[in-house]
Amino acid sequence: MDKKQVYCRYCGKLIDEDAPFCTYCGKPQGEVGQGIIGIKRKTIQYMEFLASVILSILGLLCLPFKKLVNICFSNVQKNKFRRVKRVVLRYFIIIITICAVIGGGIAGYSYYYDEYLPEKYLKEAYNDIINKYNTTNDSTKLDIAIKISRPSYPWEREYPKIEEGRMTVLLRFEDQSTKDGYCGKASDFIIAKAKENNAKAQYFMGMMLLGGENSYWLSDTTRAVYWFNESAKNGYPKAFGEIGTAYEQGIGVNCNPYKAVELFKKGANLNDPKSQYKLGCMYRDGISVECGWHWKTKSTTEYMSDKENVIREYWDSQRATSVYVYREKITDYKTLVPQDINQAKYWWRKASAQGYTDATISLQQVYD
């Protein structure tokens, strides 16, 4: 059966009715929106419409400016506008200049007081410390070396114009001729003096080996106790408080309350504030130690599950119950330091008078 034919809308030749394209001119048939080509054509039409709408809106918005541009001014008005423009420009330049001068002044002031002066004071203080370290005798040099070797030493108390913490950094990193700068040189000097049997240097060696905020060194409590012992042998008062604490708490050595009490008493009599404070705490609490044990005979009517310690068992007719006679192991204690609050306050007052904060707090707690 022959298909129904129609004329091509473009070239006018007969083609099949359901043919999507003309077999002669190749153009699409059917509705305009049919196929991919129709979609593209519609898209272009929509974009052209949207563009025309946007241009129309912009034209309406720019209409007042267009009218303003087309206004005709007289020569008098134009001269007036020129004068106003010159005045505005002149004042604008003046304002910009004033702002530049003020801003430059503020920037200069900020640099001078925030950068230049602090750096100047820091350099002056640094040079002063190094000069003292290099020119003084061994005793004073040791004191300065101990300050330099402490990472938390408050240099700003001696040099109020420097910023907090800056001097410690400068002393450690400014001079690179040796490891850790002048901190390294100071540590080497302290070690040398400790080996020469200087009690103060030996004590500070122990403090540095304890580690923490007192030192740049790694903690080594066994070696710290050794140097505290050496310092105590040479009669340095502060060493007794540290070595006594070591024996009291078992730091680097085994706990030994006998030794701790003995060392605290020696240090307290040598006017060491830490020893005085610790001895006061012992009098406040009282210190007793185990010194053996003994057996004690007891009786009970409760059932005894531990038959090994039961000596005998009998029936009590009056109470109508069994009575167990047994022995119990009792620990014996020896008093090293008796509990005496008056003695505690006595030693705390001595430590507080030397500025030992913990002793002052303990006194306040007692009186409160």
Image (tube, grey):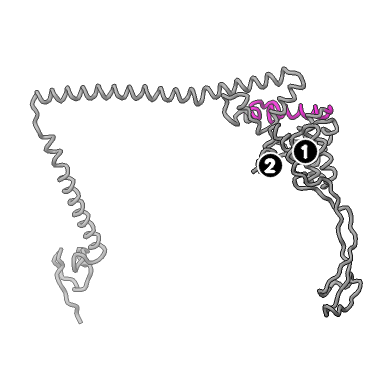
The nearer-to-camera label among 1 and 2 is 2
Q: Amino acid at mark 2?
A: Ser
Find residue 26 and report its horizontal and vertical position in percent. 22, 64
- Asked if residue 358 is among those painted magenta in the image, a careful observer would answer no
Find residue 366 and report its horizontal and vertical position in percent. 68, 43
The answer to which of marks 1 and 2 sits earlier in the sequence is: 1
Main secondary-structure element of the magenta-colored stretch: helix
Residue at label 1? 242
Q: Is residue 219 visible?
A: no
- Residue nearer the viewer, 291 or 188: 291
For this orientation, the residue located farthest to the front is 318
Q: Quadrant of the N terminus?
A: bottom left
- Of helix, strand and loop, which one carries label 2? helix
Residue at label 2? 362
Q: Is residue 156 above or below residue 361?
A: above
Using a 10 Å C-alpha cutoff, classify the residue at mark 1 as few (fewer than 14 neighbours), some (14 to 19) or many (20 or more).
Answer: many
Q: Is residue 245 above or below residue 113?
A: below
- Residue nearer the viewer, 17 or 74: 74
For this orientation, the residue located farthest to the bottom is 1
Q: Is residue 365 above or below residue 77?
A: below
Q: Amino acid at mark 1?
A: Glu
- Asked if residue 187 is among those painted magenta in the image, a careful observer would answer yes
Find residue 109 and report its horizontal and vertical position in percent. 45, 23
Q: Residue at x 76, y 22 (%)?
A: 139
Residue 281 figure quarter: top right
Q: Quadrant of the C terminus?
A: top right
- Residue nearer the viewer, 264 or 285: 285
Using a 10 Å C-alpha cutoff, classify the residue at mark 2 as few (fewer than 14 neighbours), some (14 to 19) or many (20 or more).
Answer: some
- Of helix, strand and loop, which one carries label 1? helix
Residue 184 figure quarter: top right
Residue 21 figure quarter: bottom left
Which portion, as a residue range, is magenta?
170-197
